[in-house]
Amino acid sequence: MSAPRRIGFEPIVDADTRLLILGSLPGDASLKAAQYYAHPRNGFWPLIGGVLGEDLPALPYEQRLARLRGRGVGLWDVIASAERAGSLDAAIRSPEAADLRGLVESLPKLRAVAFNGGLAARLGRRILGGLDAIELVDLPSSSPAHAISLSAKAQTWAILGKFLPDKPAD
């Protein structure tokens, strides 16, 4: 018996996106909430908040997204849809790739694409390899299933700051 097919979200980007962070495919908690990184134990919001110097977890979701956009950060996933029981990347079957090249080519200010986790990096690098003007960055997964401390993850995630403007856009 096959697992249910999960369909990801639309990208959160605009013409000022300088950094695009790509996950693999939203987990069940995120899909149910219709929000990126909705699982309460996922470290994404504290991690990116640390990069931006803001307490993003304290804000409502729409304000979090507005803060990301204001600093040139976009979100999406490398997988548009896949069969998956549960939320683990290891359970993904029959993935359909998102149109990463099409999105990247539509973002004139894009400087870097960061992959949130190993699967996102493997699939994303396969799709985006050979793009000269864009730096590709592998990050430890923000998922609680990736069992290293949030502070250790934050040390690696801090590199993202070099791709962002010093102050928010108005």
Image (cartoon, rainbow, N blue to C red):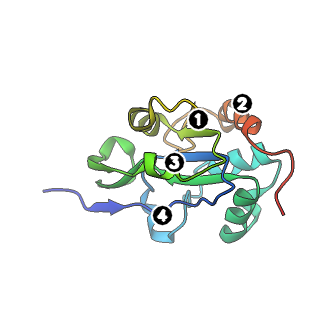
Q: Are marks 2 and 1 in contact (CB under 8 Å)?
A: no
Sequence-wise, the earlier of marks 3 and 1 is 3
Q: What amino acid is found at the position of numbered circle 2 in the picture?
A: Gln
N-terminal label among 2 and 1: 1
Q: CA distance from mark 3 to mark 4?
A: 16 Å
Above or below, 104 relative to 121: below
State which mark lies toward you, 2 or 1.
Answer: 1
Q: Is residue 42 left or right of residue 170?
A: left
Determine which quarter of the picture holds residue 165.
top right
Q: Are marks 4 and 2 in contact (CB under 8 Å)?
A: no
Give, as a three-letter code, the residue at label 3: Glu
Residue at 76% in and 53% down: 71
**Residue 38, image x, y percentages:** 56, 61
Instruction: Say which residue label 1 marks.
Output: 134
Task: Determine the residue positioned at 39% across, 52% down.
Answer: 98
Task: Identify the element where label 3 is drawn.
Answer: helix
On residue 105, the disc is 3
Q: Which residue is mark 2?
A: 155
Quadrant of the image occupied by residue 63: bottom right
Q: Secondary structure at mark 1?
A: loop
Where 91 sits versus 153, above or below?
A: below
For label 2, the crowd category at 10 Å Cα-Cα, with few meaning under 14, some 14 to 19 and many 20 or more, is few
Q: Residue 72: x percent and y percent? A: 71, 52
- Please state which of the two labelled residues, at mark 3 or mark 2, is closer to the viewer: 3
Looking at the rendered structure, the kind of residue marked 4 is Glu
**Label 1: few (<14), some (14–19) or many (≥20) C-alpha neighbours in 10 Å:** some
Residue at the extreme left: 1
Q: Is residue 11 above or below residue 132?
A: below
Alpha carbon distance from label 3 to label 1: 10 Å
> Depth check: 143 or 119 in front?
119
